[in-house]
Amino acid sequence: MHVGALVLGGAAALLVGAIERIRDPDPFGGTMHCLLSCRSVGCLILLAVLMVACDRPPDDEADRARERRAADAVRLADERFDPVAFEELEPLRPETVQERGRVIYEVSCAKCHGPEGRGDGGFVFQGDTLQPRSFSDPDWERIRVPMELRRMIYVGTAEGMPHWGIRGLRVRDVDAVAAYVERELIEG
Ligand code: HEC
């Protein structure tokens, strides 16, 4: 974008300079005159202003696109979330579920939520400084309701919590990691 604008602007400045030179030959000016004539300098200033102006919209657009994608992902995951699928999971031994939950937590969650779930995983989400709260925050009522906790993990949020239900975890995995959070991290 910048290189293209620079080349175009430079070419325009030279062209304007050259046209001026043809229309008004100046025996003392030479090439420098072409380059530095008032209009070509004007062109360069215009180019600089355009480059600064062009710099902003792509950033805003990228932010807006990211927000739109996050909102779409939350909507899609929310549509897919089905509490019945959790209720109908084939029961496994609690130790098996805990072990699966621990592995998933360490692989997929600890980098943001921290090894103890205190929100100190240190992973800054795409330059966003939003930090998850500690799982033992007493004000965090919703995560104490089992199906709400599973819904949160499955659906995620537009503010940095991934949408696990549509990003690689199966219902069985979401259930296991939720059980791990409930047993090892909320209380502790
Ligand atoms: C990329 C960083 C990141 C990863 C990885 C991540 N989370 Fe989160 N999580 C967040 C952020 C940020 C929030 C706070 C979001 C908010 O307040 O909207 C959050 C919130 C939560 C919440 C509470 C949501 C609410 O709205 O109250 C739960 C529960 C949770 N995460 C569980 C998990 C589990 C389980 C995993 C692993 C399967 C996981 N998270 C992986 C960043 C992450």
Image (spheres, rainbow, N blue to C red):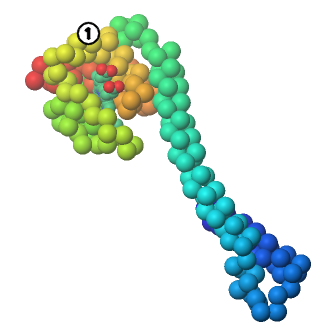
Whereabouts is ligand 1, in terms of quadrant?
top left
Horizontal placement of 27 versus 122: left or right?
A: right
Q: Quadrant of the C terminus?
A: top left
Horizontal placement of 65 versus 131: left or right?
A: right
Residue farthest right in this picture: 23
Depth order, front residue of 91/181:
181
Q: Quadrant of the N terminus?
A: bottom right
Q: Can residue 176 be seen at all in this image of the molecule?
A: no
Horizontal and vertical percent for residue 154?
39, 21
- Residue at x-position 53% and y-position 30%: 68
Q: Quadrant of residue 101?
A: top left
- Residue at x-position 82% and y-position 92%: 27
Horizontal and vertical percent for residue 122?
24, 43
Q: Quadrant of residue 124?
A: top left
Q: Which residue is mark 1?
A: 145
- Residue at x-position 27% and y-position 12%: 142
In the structure shown, which secondary structural element does the residue marked by tag 1 occupy?
A: loop
Horizontal placement of 82 versus 174: left or right?
A: right
